[in-house]
Image (cartoon, rainbow, N blue to C red):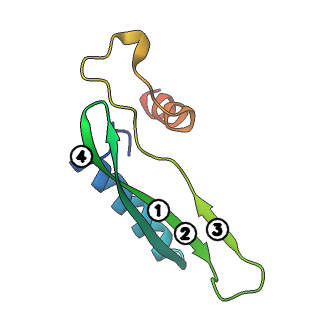
């Protein structure tokens, strides 16, 4: 998952499938909220992963997270955006 995953890309699909598959294996119920939205680079397909633990329970946990990367066509070094959690994981993996 230490990869750029801009919306509507192959990497984004791989990251989404990994997250959904891992949570499904752990017993979570997965919903995919799919939509198309306008971006500065044209219409892009977006998919949110919504995971629910024990959806029929009166009290349950619902997990949602923003996992895609902001797209820069030619990012200067000071504009490469990596989510903080992913950056910490990446730095630890490189150490």
The percent coordinates of residue 16 (x first, y second) are 37, 57
Disc 4/disc 3 C-alpha distance (Å):
26 Å
Q: Which residue is mark 3?
A: 62
Relative to the observer, which residue lies in front, 80 or 89?
80
* Mark 4 crowd level (few <14, some 14–19, many ≥20, 10 Å Cα): some
The percent coordinates of residue 42 (x first, y second) are 24, 38
Q: Which residue is mark 1?
A: 49
Secondary structure at numbered mark 4 = loop
- The reply to whether dot 2 and dot 4 touch (C-beta < 8 Å) is no
Disc 2/disc 4 C-alpha distance (Å):
22 Å
Q: Which residue is mark 2?
A: 51
- The reply to whether dot 1 and dot 3 touch (C-beta < 8 Å) is no
Labels 3 and 2: the sequence-earlier one: 2
Q: Which residue is mark 4?
A: 9
* Mark 3 crowd level (few <14, some 14–19, many ≥20, 10 Å Cα): some
* Mark 2 crowd level (few <14, some 14–19, many ≥20, 10 Å Cα): many
Relative to the observer, which residue lies in front, 32 or 44?
44
What residue lies at 33% left-to-right and 42% top-to-bottom?
38
* Mark 1 crowd level (few <14, some 14–19, many ≥20, 10 Å Cα): some
Secondary structure at numbered mark 2 = strand
Disc 1/disc 3 C-alpha distance (Å):
10 Å
The percent coordinates of residue 59 (x first, y second) are 77, 79
Judged left or right of residue 88, residue 60 is right
Disc 4/disc 1 C-alpha distance (Å):
16 Å
């Amino acid at each position: 998952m230490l990869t750029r995953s801009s919306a509507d890309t192959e990497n984004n699909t791989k990251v989404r499938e990994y997250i959904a598959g891992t949570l499904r294996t752990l017993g979570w119920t997965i919903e995919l909220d799919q939509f198309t939205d306008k971006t500065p680079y044209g219409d892009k397909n977006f998919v949110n992963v919504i995971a629910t633990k024990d959806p029929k329970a009166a009290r349950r946990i619902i997990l949602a997270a923003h996992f895609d990367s902001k797209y820069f066509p030619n990012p200067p070094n000071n504009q490469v955006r990596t989510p903080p959690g992913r950056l910490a994981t990446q730095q630890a993996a490189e150490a």
